[in-house]
Image: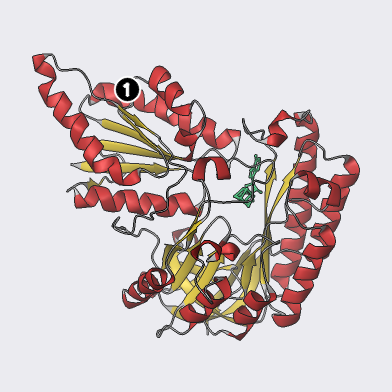
Amino acid sequence: MYYKIVTYGCQMNVHESEKIAGLLEAEGYRPCADGENADIVVFNTCCIRDNAERRALGNIGVIKAEKKKNPALVLAVVGCMTQQDGAAETIRNKYPYVDIVLGTRDISLLPSEIRKVLSARAKAEKGAKKYRCFDNSFPEDYSDIDEATPVVRTSFPNAWVNIIYGCNNFCSYCIVPYVRGRELSRDMGKVLDEVRRCVDEGYGEITLLGQNVNSYGHDLHAKGVNFAALLGEIDKIDGKFRVRFMTSHPKDLTEEVADVMAESAKICNNLHLPVQSGSNKVLADMNRRYTREKYLSLIDMLRAKMPDIGITTDVMVGFPTETEEDFADTADLMRQVRYSNAFTFVYSPRKGTPAAAMPQIPYEIKKRRIGELIKLQNSVTKELSETYKGGVYEVLVEDVAPKYGDSVCGRTESGRLVTFGGSPDLVGKFVNVKITEARSASLFGHIE
Ligand code: 5AD
Ligand code: SF4
């Protein structure tokens, strides 16, 4: 029996798909190679923007043909999209060939629901009713974290490790708090155990995950447990490995965390710090709870402690109240900060969020603004790439890069991608690479 998981969205979803794989493999399913027929297909969905949702629904539609060829196929839709108001009903009515819909807190039910679908099918000859599961219930008082779900890791040499689930921030544009619920931190001992296990298994990079890693521990009410303390404890674990984390909310990033980053050997000089907008008015309307000045002072503080830190961001254009002046403030902030990379998004109204109820900006304006930001960031990235030329950097080899001949690629501590000549057996190893060429976002070099 073979399974296929189609994943949309962020790293949190990528890691959740590793857990889904763990559950299915424990049931005896094996991963299906490209082009092979699967017995179960799981869509792990995202709903952060309209295009993510439309892509998932489109592909669920495409599966209909596959299901016709292979009626034994079990089709499951899980993840954020299923948790939106009315989503389960839409899937129930519009996609009658979907067998299972499970919400973000129910993944561990997947194996038992598959068994129910299969047993109902086995009985179908005797006139039994087709079984379909639509369980996206979301208990408001949930407090248990499922620690028992097995994980089949798929991103060696990087291992994703959850530290906090959910989000309490309610940025006015964002659907995440509605579909992922309130913040729930994992026990620090359990996080440390998982990191130790990954390091023992040879993972060279650990990425700590959470919608807002900086609020780690607030809900645990345990003395001395916070994000800085967690980083400090992870840094003490024996072995050669690197630690990254995402995402940090600027309102919660403390100087204490920056100090641990600067002093530690293993925590990378690399930070993802979403700014969203450079205008104080828009930041207030977004309910971000920091100002442009506060954000810029954080950047100064970080660079004073770690001059070579690579800082990346998320930035949005077309929020309902964004004027040309506000947009100019965002572009200006980006010029000032000089991010090593920026993920730029066009604001997409999400049903049920406060910003979706405001008068919206025409798409043409959003399109022009995003084009300008991308161009601006590309030129900054290119300039920063040039500064790497001639330097020697430690790189963790992540993958082969056949596009460039017998080559491999990996990242510097600051998070920049480097491609260089090398054999596949280097994947997972640390090597020193001299940078000889810079092409916009990509660096090239050779092993020193
Ligand atoms: N429209 C566009 N982008 C969004 N993001 C979150 N919600 C929306 C939305 N409604 C962006 C933010 C966030 C990133 C993960 O996605 O920039 O940091
Ligand atoms: Fe969404 Fe804001 Fe929470 Fe990030 S911090 S997940 S943008 S509500």
Relative to 94, is 226 above or below? below
The spot of residue 130 in percent (x, y) is 22, 20
Q: Which residue is mark 1?
A: 97
Where residue 397 appears, as percent x and y from the top left, is 45, 72
In the structure shown, which secondary structural element does the residue marked by tag 1 occupy? Answer: loop
Amino acid beneath label 1: Tyr
Q: Residues within 10 Å of mark 1 (few under 14, many from 20)?
A: many
**Residue 239, position in %: x, y?**
40, 84
Vertical position of residue 170 compared to residue 264: above or below: above
In this rendering, position of residue 314 left or right of residue 224: right
Classify residue 82 as left or right of residue 274.
left
Quarter of the rendering containing residue 60: top left
Q: Residue furthest top?
A: 127
Q: Is residue 328 visible?
A: yes
Which residue in the rendered view is the most extreme toward the right? 325
Which sits in the foreground, 326 or 223?
223
Q: Is residue 170 above or below residue 231?
A: above
Residue drawn at point x = 36 percent, y = 43 percent:
106
Q: Nearer the viewer, residue 35 or 46?
A: 46
Residue 194 position by quadrant = bottom left
Q: Quadrant of ligand 1?
A: top right
Instruction: Identify which residue is drawn at 70% across, 40% down.
Output: 346
Residue lying at 14% horizontally and 30% vertically, measured from the top left: 119
| Residue 440 in sight in this render | no
- Rendered location of residue 325, percent (x, y): 91, 45
Q: Residue furthest left?
A: 126
